[in-house]
Structure formats: C-alpha cells, structure tokens
Image (spheres, rainbow, N blue to C red):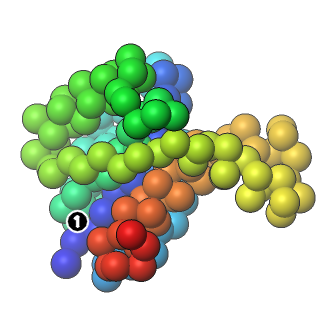
Amino acid sequence: MGKVLGIDYGERRIGIALSDEDQRYAFHLRTLDQADPAALSGELRALCRDEGIETIVIGLPLQPDGRKGKNALDVERFGAQLSRTLGVGIVYEDERLSSVMAQKLMTDAGRSERAMRGSLDERAAQLILQAYLDRKHGKVS
C-alpha cells in the first residue's frame, strides 16, 4: 500500500501532509510557496516519486451550507491539473474549519502567532488528511 499525500491549498501557500504506509496516520510535512508554479510542480512530482504516493487528498473549501463556491472551484482546477501532471488519483475532503482547528490546536499548545505562520497550512493539511484516513478506515462517519 502506498502513502497518501494531503494538501491544504491556498492562493499563496500549500500545506503538505503525508500518511504512513498503512494509511492510518497523517503527519504534517512542510509548507510550499505558490510563487513559482514550475518549482511547486517539481517539488510535488519529486515528493510523489520519493514517497510512493498513490493518492492525493486535497481539502475542498465548501461553503457553510455545503455548496461549492469560487474557492472550491479553484481547488478542483488545481486538483485536475495535478492529476494530469502527476498521474496520481485525486480525492477531495471537506475542509471546512480545518485552518481554524489547526490554529486552535497550535494556540492551545502554546505556539505564538508568529511561530504558527510557517506551519499553520501544513497542520491544516494534516487535519484534512487524517479526516480522510479515519473515514477510510471506518473511524468516523
């Protein structure tokens, strides 16, 4: 079984998380910058190759009522492009409140806002990926 990559997509930064080989646990990995799309694509390609990624889970920012807005459509375009570029399956996971939850967890752990800046996106990616893995293994409905 290959690993699963989790992504929290943002206009400026992309948070990255990675599962273990059994696809049970998500670990935050790093935050990538969107400034250079070619470099971003290269980093994601290398990561998928090096880690044996079989699926990418991307957080889908649905509106509070569950409908897709502009941001969700942007994420789906990004996912379609990734699928074509990397040849990896894409799955979307509802990410409503993942960034808020990541910030709360980090604040509760005593992290300052300045310390959070670099890792908030990757922590949100970890929460998105863990929700997918839990659902996949029947831990949540």
Q: Residue at x 39, y 21 (%)?
A: 69
Image mark count: 1
Q: Is residue 98 above or below residue 54?
A: above
- State left or right for residue 28 relative to residue 1: right
Inspect this view and state whether residue 93 appears.
Answer: yes
| Residue placed most toward the observer, 109 or 28 | 109
Q: Residue at x 57, y 48 (%)?
A: 98
Q: Is residue 60 above or below residue 125?
A: above
Q: Residue at x 38, y 17 (%)?
A: 70
Quadrant of the drawing holding the C terminus: bottom left
Q: Secondary structure at mark 1?
A: loop
Picture coordinates of residue 14, whole percent (x, y): 48, 37
Picture coordinates of residue 100, whole percent (x, y): 67, 44
| Residue placed most toward the observer, 44 or 57 | 57
Picture coordinates of residue 34, whole percent (x, y): 45, 25
| Residue placed most toward the observer, 87 or 90 | 90
Q: Amino acid at mark 1?
A: Gly
Which residue carries the number 1 mark?
52
- State left or right for residue 97 relative to residue 77: right
Callout 1 crowding tier (Cα within 10 Å): few <14, some 14–19, many ≥20: some
Q: Which residue lies most toward the front here?
A: 65
Inspect this view and state whether residue 78 appears.
Answer: no
To which quarter of the image does residue 43 belong? top left
To which quarter of the image does residue 81 belong? top left
Q: Residue at x 19, y 78 (%)?
A: 1
